[in-house]
Structures are given as structure tokens and as C-alpha cells.
Image (cartoon, rainbow, N blue to C red):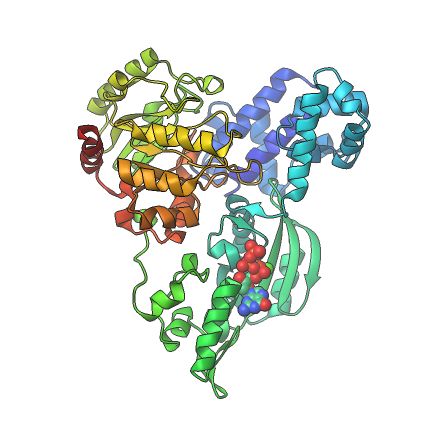
Amino acid sequence: MKNPILSELFNQMADIMEILGEDRFRINSYRKVARVISDIPADVETLLATGELAKTPGIGKSSLAKIQEFIQTGTITAHQQLLTKIPPKLLELLTIPGMGPKGVKAIYEKLNVTSIAELKGAIGAGSLAQLPGFGDKKAAAIAKGIEFLEKSTGRIRLDQALEAADMVSGFLRGLSGIQRIQAAGSLRRRAETIGDVDILVAAGKGRQVIQAFTESRFVEEVLAAGPTKGSAIVQTYDAPVHVDVRVVPEKSFGAAAQYFTGSKQHNVRLREIAVKAKLKLNEYGLFKADKMIAGAVEEEIYRKLGLDYIEPLLREDRGEVEAAKSHLLPELIEFEDIKGDLHVHTNASDGDCDISELARAAKRAGYKYICITDHSRSSAIANGLSAKRLAQQIKQIRKLNEELKGIMILAGTEVDILADGSLDFDNKLLCELDFVIAAIHSGLASPREKVTTRTLKAMDNPYVNCIAHPTGRLIGQREPMDIDIAAVIKHAAQTHTALEVNANPWRLDLKDTHCRMAIEAGVKLVIGTDAHSVAGLGLMGFGVATAARGWATRADVLNTLSSAKIGSWAACKRKG
Ligand code: DGT
Ligand code: CA
Ligand code: CA
């Protein structure tokens, strides 16, 4: 699917034009195209072929031509031309947290800064702080952003890794002589960040496969290319991604999948078991003396070691090997178990589309219900709803439910938890809602005691059913709040409040280990996408994987229940 890449390209063109001070109208129209493309659930390539793309609002003739050019050639001439108009490293400034095109434009024009390295110089010399519109405070924030960027170990988000893996796997699938393809490593385990992407291929002619990979058009830089392994930097328009491709014979494919999926610690445990049983385990197979007793099929490796099959999501040496030995592995939650999404935003607050668009998309996704949870008034930048607007929205939802078939719309809110732990809406209004999620959106840097008490107090409210993104982290961009997560989990159990697993790959909050703590304490999880568009609904899988990495079963997750059962669950707390 080329939608994410195309969307990113149009955004990048808009960024460059904004830095160059070009026509506002064109910049906005590129941004609009980027947004439209990323929101269309269908593949742009297909829509172009069927002629539907030409009819899509927001996509004009010239954008259509650019999309066509990209699909045919892999580049857009206008994009290439724009790139020649700016210094090669200028766009890296946009990766600094909090830095937008306007800031880059000012820094570039007034200080002639063309890279992060030069910007650090300008901060050190005090010239950034003297620039109109910046000042000491902003310069310090930018310095901190750069520090954060440099501290981040080059690990990427799950969605970025997946995009690179899809590009490479899709390409490899088209080659001749390919028998099997499988992503391995931390990506297959759905770890929250990914160091590099590992892809395994079963094929006869290794060298040819590796050569085709390293010479493919999305490879930016080749790090190594041999007869069975190639390493390269793949450019995804969102991030440069390190990808390792390994070719193995089909008879070893299962063993290689096991070995290269890891984790390292998990593999160490398996090898110990093998050694005790006088067997040898490596990436080629499981051997008794010199005889291969398993290798082609991954499940066989586990079986011959006397273990139940362990899902990749659990392979972290967190007790899964012991559990597999004694047949006590959990039956993990799967995407198919999810009956609805309990966290979505409409254009009434900061989302892109209206209630019925989201509801129809949810129905297409096979859900039974969707809960509309727009922001409340204190989230002013997100155009949060006043009590009056929420009351109107509830009426609108009840009316829509009479019209729409096959999907139930629940009325909810993502209500702000205020500084003192009280909420943005009073109980009289909250009582009208089907499901209430509460969240902290300000003061995230406050001391531990403060953010913890705030959250505990919100849970005391009988109408609060769930705490959204309980730690507030943004992966690679913002540290979690210094919150006492053990206290939050304990209080959630005591107050019959669920905790969210926010499925957005920027958040994954609760994270896997916190999910496990919550489940062990008897707390229910809600997996919500926090979608702000139709495309956002598609993030559910990341949340399901995160919960499963925390050993969640279907019974641990509230939105595997029918909407009626969720209603009774919420009623329990209201009754006290
Ligand atoms: P990453 O890339 O840092 O997110 O994490 P992984 O787990 O993908 O690690 P990576 O790419 O270095 O290696 C892929 C897998 O290969 C790893 O999970 C386990 C296996 N592996 C790599 N090196 C070793 C090793 O020295 N011993 C063992 N037992 N396994 C290894
Ligand atoms: Ca890896
Ligand atoms: Ca690797």
C-alpha cells in the first residue's frame, strides 16, 4: 500500500514550500492531499486504476498527475525539484520535537543554519535566543529536543518498521524462486520499538535474492551484501530503516524463524533445554547427534523440546518457557476478539470526520459498536466540547442510531482530568453517557505525587470507566509522566475502573509489562485506537499485540464484550 509514502511526500513538499515561503494556497492544498490520502482506507493505486481517485474531493488534476507519476516511476519530479532548492540537511531540523516549518524557515533565513549541527552552534552562541519569536525559553526547549533526539538510540516505532518490512517483503515476493517470507526479530515480537527489521526468505538462490534487494530502488545505502545476508538502509519517507534480509534453505526455515525471532534471552533458555536433552539447536535446525529432528517447521522445534508452541509475542523470557513446559500458556487475545473501539475522535473536537463516517468505517471493520469520545473543553487546542456541545452530541448519536443499521454508536467522552483531579464535566452530564474515559492532557511534567493523586482521584468518580493513556508517553518524543503505576493499578482494581491500552504506535500506553501487572491485579483493559480519522481505526492491531505481550486473554479486555455487557459492567460502578 503506497498511501503512507505518498501522504508523507505531499507533506514534505508542503514543508519545503513553507520553508521557502511559497504560496499559502498551494501549501494548504498539498497538506489537504496528504491528509486525504492517509485517510482513504483503500489503496491509492487501486483507486487510481479504477478512476475513483480522480473523483475524490481534495485531489485536483495536478495532484492526481503527481500520484500517477509516483506510482509509475517511484518519484515525483516536483518533489525532487523542491529538494534541490534547500540545503541537503535542512529537513532534519523538522525531526526536532516541537520544530515546525515556520521555525525552520526563520532559522534558515535569519541565521543561515542548515543542519542540526549548525543549530547546536547557534544555540551555544546565544544567537537562537536573540532571534525574534524565539527567546531563552524556546531556545532551551529546542536544545532539549535535540538532546532527546540524540539520546534516542536510533530505534524506530513499530509502524515505521512495519512499513519498511511491508515494502521489502512485497518486493521480495515478486522475485522468482521465493518459497517463503517471514518477518522475524523484534518486529515479529511486536516490541514497542525496533532496532532493525529482520526478514527471512526461503529460496534456492541466495545471492540473487540479496542482490535484487540491495539494488532495489528503495535502498538508500547498502551496508553489506553476501551470499545469504544483505543489510541496507531502506528509505520509507518517514524514517530511514535498517533492514536485514537473510536467505535460508526451506528445510531450515522453521529453525531460522525461531532463531532470528529471538529474543536473545528466550533463545538462551531454549538452548539450555536442548543441551539438557542432549540435543543441538541452532538456526539450521534441531539435531540429535548429526540427525536433524526438526527444522522446516517452527512449531516442531518447540514440540521436540517438550514445550507447547510459544507465540512470538511472548518470547521475552518472562516466564513463557516455564509456562509452555507445564501447559499453562495463556490463550492470547486476538484482533478477531475485539467487538468495538471505545476511543475515537470526530471533527467536533480534533478529528477529521463526522460520527457517521466513523461508524460506517467501524462497521466495515466488522465491529459491533464504536464509542465517540471527543475531548472536553479544557483541551482547548483540540477544540474540546463544552457541556452544551456534548449534550447536543449525545442527542445526535441517539438519533443516528435509529438510522444506522448493523453498528451501535455509544456516547462517550475523553474528559480532561483537571489539575486537582476533578473533571471537566459534572456527574449529571456524565451520567447521560454510555462510557466515560478520563485522561490527563496538561501538567504531565508535574511531580510523581501530583500526577498520581490526580489520576487516583479521577478513578474515584463513579462515572469514570477508564483512564486513557495512563502514563502519557509519546515514543521517541516525550517521556512518560513520573506516575506511580503500581498505585494506579491497585486503585483501578479497587474502584472498578479499566485502564486503556492506547493502540497508537506513538503511545502503546499502557505498555506490555504494565498490562501484565494490571491483569494480575484483576484490572480490565480497554484497547482503544484514539483514532482521529478513519485510517486511525486501523491501528487496533498494535494495541492488541501490546496487550497480548502483557499476556492478555479475551477475558481481560473489556471491548471483547457486547455493548450491552459493557453497559452492565459500567452500571456496577455507578451503583457502587
Ligand atoms: P532489535 O533489532 O534491537 O529491535 O531486536 P532483535 O530482537 O530484532 O535483535 P537483532 O536484530 O539483533 O537479532 C534478531 C534475532 O536474532 C534476535 O532476537 C535473536 C537472534 N540473535 C541475534 N544474535 C544472537 C545471539 O548472539 N545469540 C542468540 N541466541 N540469538 C541471537
Ligand atoms: Ca532486529
Ligand atoms: Ca538484525
Q: In which quarter of the image is residue 226?
A: bottom right
Question: Residue at the spot x=62%, y=20% of the render?
Answer: 26
* Most foreground residue, 162 or 217: 162
Q: Quadrant of residue 323?
A: bottom left
For the view shown, which residue lies furthest in the bottom direction? 289
Ligand 3 found in image quarter: bottom right
> Where is residue 528 drawn, in percent x and y?
37, 37
User: Vertically, is 323 above or below 398?
Assistant: below
| Side (left or right) of 430 relative to 481 | left
* Most foreground residue, 62 or 298: 298
| Side (left or right) of 1 relative to 77 | left
User: Vertically, is 17 above or below 302?
Assistant: above
| Side (left or right) of 42 relative to 193 | left
> Where is residue 463 drawn, in percent x and y?
26, 26
The answer to whether residue 114 shows anywhere in this view is no
User: Vertically, is 470 above or below 354?
Assistant: below
Q: How many marks?
A: 0
> Where is residue 114 drawn, in percent x and y?
78, 31
The answer to whether residue 575 shows anywhere in this view is yes
For the view shown, which residue lies furthest in the front direction? 449
Question: Residue at the spot x=58%, y=35% of the render?
Answer: 8
Question: Residue at the spot x=46%, y=60% of the render?
Answer: 316
The image quadrant where one finds the C terminus is top left
> Where is residue 529 drawn, in percent x and y?
40, 36
